[in-house]
Image (cartoon, helix red, strand yellow):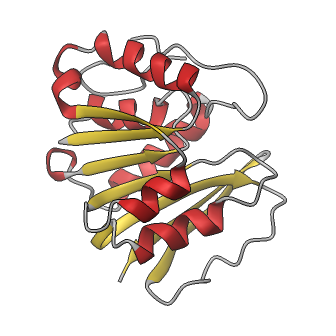
Amino acid sequence: MRIIAGEYRGRIIRTCSGPGYRPATGKVRESLFSMLESRGITWKETDVLDLFAGSGSLGIESLSRGARKAVFVDKNSRACDLIRLNVSTLLNARQRSRVVKGDALAFAGSNPGMGFNLVFVDPPYGQGLARPAVESLLRADLVRRHGLISAELESGLSFEAGFHPELEIIRDRTFGQTRILMWKKK
């Protein structure tokens, strides 16, 4: 997998394999970042949280585009080591990133007020973790006012896009077996 745009464009991101890991394809990542940029995101002012990070491709793509910082959270120590390895090859990204080995729901609930402009929620399919993750983020006030949450889900999942009064749905798109839901915090 390669970084699509920005300072590290073309660099290879090593990915995880095994149950529950399905790195976002280049097409999905390109569409997702196009959606974000069409919403007027200013990367140099953006703090990113990559929950259920896996290989960290979404946070790393954000850093490449100039994000101020990225925090990666995954409970698998192999995935965390891989993210550290991927980030270590990106000269200016090391100082702007942090990798947390831990449960995404616990992280969201135990870091109140930390504050992010952009949160990626990309849980393993079939485990029903997206909604509790988004609710934990809001309960702990981890999403700044007007911040964006992007969730990558399986396309067949029944998920009410307007499920929370603090969130305004701004995108709901399907790419084959992948569904991207994007909300803005009111």
State the quadrant of the N terminus.
top right
State left or right for residue 29 relative to residue 132: left
Is residue 10 visible to us here?
no
Foreground residue among 132 and 6: 132
Above or below, 175 against 157 in this view is above
* 31 relative position to 9: left or right: right
Residue 149 position, x and y percent, is 45, 62
Quarter assignment of residue 164: bottom right
Q: Residue at x 34, y 62 (%)?
A: 39
Q: Is residue 173 above or below residue 66?
A: below
The residue lying toward the viewer, choosing from 117 and 82, is: 82
Q: Residue at x 47, y 51 (%)?
A: 120
Q: Quadrant for the C terminus, please.
A: bottom left
- Looking at the image, which residue is at 53% across and 73% down? 135
Give the residue displayed 17% in from the left and 42% down from the top.
Answer: 68
Specify whether residue 111 is in view: yes
Q: Position of residue 80 (x, y in %)?
A: 48, 25
